[in-house]
Every structure is written in C-alpha cells, then in structure tokens.
Image: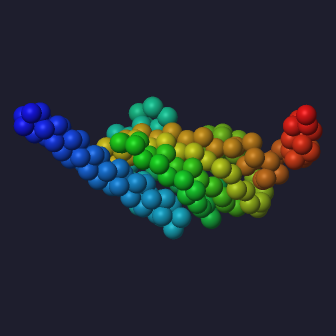
Amino acid sequence: MRISIIAIVAFFAGIAVTSAAETDTAAANSALIRGHHEALNRGDWKTAVQDFAADTRNFGRPVGRAVIARILEDIYRTFPDFHVEIIDLLTQGETVVVRCNESGTHRGVGQLPVNGGMLVGVAPTQKHFEAEVVHFYTVRDGKIVDHRGVRDDLAMVQQLGLLAEPKPFDWAKFSQEANKP
C-alpha cells in the first residue's frame, strides 16, 4: 500500500513539474508575442523583425528574417500609422494565437503582394481601415519560427474605397423572423 501511495504521489509530482515548465514556456511565448506587437505599434518594425528566427517560415514556406523585414517595411510604407490591438491571446505549448484588430491609413503604394495582394501599385486613398485578424505563431527558443495569418481583406479594401460596399443586411430582423415559431 505504501509503495502505491508513493507511486501515485511521484506520478502527480511529475505532472506538476511538467505543468510548471509548460506554464513558464507559455508565459515566455506570450510575452514575446505581446512585445512583438508593442514594437509594431511603435512603428519599430526593425525591432519587431528581430523576434523572428533567422530561418523563419511564413505560411509554412521558408522565407528567413530578411523576407519578413521586407514584408513589414512594405506594410509600414503602405500604412505608416499601422496599429495592432490585441483582443485575445491564447498560448498552448509553442503555439500562440492572437485575435486582433489591425488598422491604418492608406498613405503609400504597396510593392509586395501582402495585404491580400490587392494594394500592389494602388495609389494611396488616404482612407483608414480597421479589420479583424487572427495570427498563428510558432515559437521555439524565444523566436518566432513560423507565422500564419487570416485577415478580412475584403473589409479592408472596401473601407479603403477600392470596392463597393455591400448593401447592409439587417441581421436583427432576419434573426427575429427566422426564430418565429
């Protein structure tokens, strides 16, 4: 009986140690990504790019830190006041997921097919946009080794005046009618 109790205590102690290590890793990964977004909000993309590993991947493609630097430079050329507001940040192991609002004023001409590829060569509209984005980061050894993101590019280009706005849909009326017995 004594051996069983010791085995059970040892088993749960091992889980506690693992959980503490995972908690420390998650906290460090969250802090890295929060700091990364803070640098972006200061317009300091040159510091933000240092959060990426030298051999980082973007959407699973090997691109390296130099490509990330050019992408961020193009974003800030196109939107000098680019800003990211974190709404939710979730960390599980080496994965950090951020749901945020990105915003900026279209004051430059995009040169790279980022921003949905819809702004390459487009003259500045001087209009402001705000769109919801979800970023997925993989972090190892204190560096971002992979990034993926999903943004509402359609809403962005509509707000910039590059596409016609759709006719507003009355969701409240639709919901009320759909839920009638």
Q: For this rendering, which residue is in front, 125 or 149?
A: 149
Q: For this rendering, which residue is in front, 6 or 87?
A: 6
Query: At 55% from the left edge and 58% from the top edge, which residue is drawn?
Result: 86
Tell me: residue 60, above or below residue 167: above
Image quadrant where residue 47 sits: bottom left
Query: At 21% from the left edge and 41% from the top edge, which residue is drawn?
Result: 12
Q: For this rendering, which residue is in front, 161 or 113?
A: 161
Q: For this rendering, which residue is in front, 50 or 24?
A: 24
Figure coloring: rainbow
For the C terminus, the image quarter is: top right
**One can see residue 99 in this view:** yes
> Where does residue 140 sit, x and y in percent of width and height?
31, 43
Query: At 86% from the left edge and 44% from the top edge, which residue is drawn?
Result: 171
Query: At 38% from the left edge and 58% from the top edge, which residue is drawn?
Result: 31
In this picture, residue 13 sits left or right of residue 26: left
In this picture, residue 66 sits left or right of residue 124: left
Disc count in the image? 0
| Name of the residue lying farthest toward the front | 1
| Name of the residue lying farthest toward the bottom | 42
Tell me: residue 80, above or below residue 17: below
> Where does residue 152 sit, x and y in percent of width and height?
69, 44
> Where does residue 84 sit, x and y in percent of width and height?
58, 59
For the N terminus, the image quarter is: top left
In this picture, residue 34 sits left or right of residue 141: right
> Where does residue 30 sit, x and y in percent of width and height?
40, 54
**One can see residue 77 in this view:** no
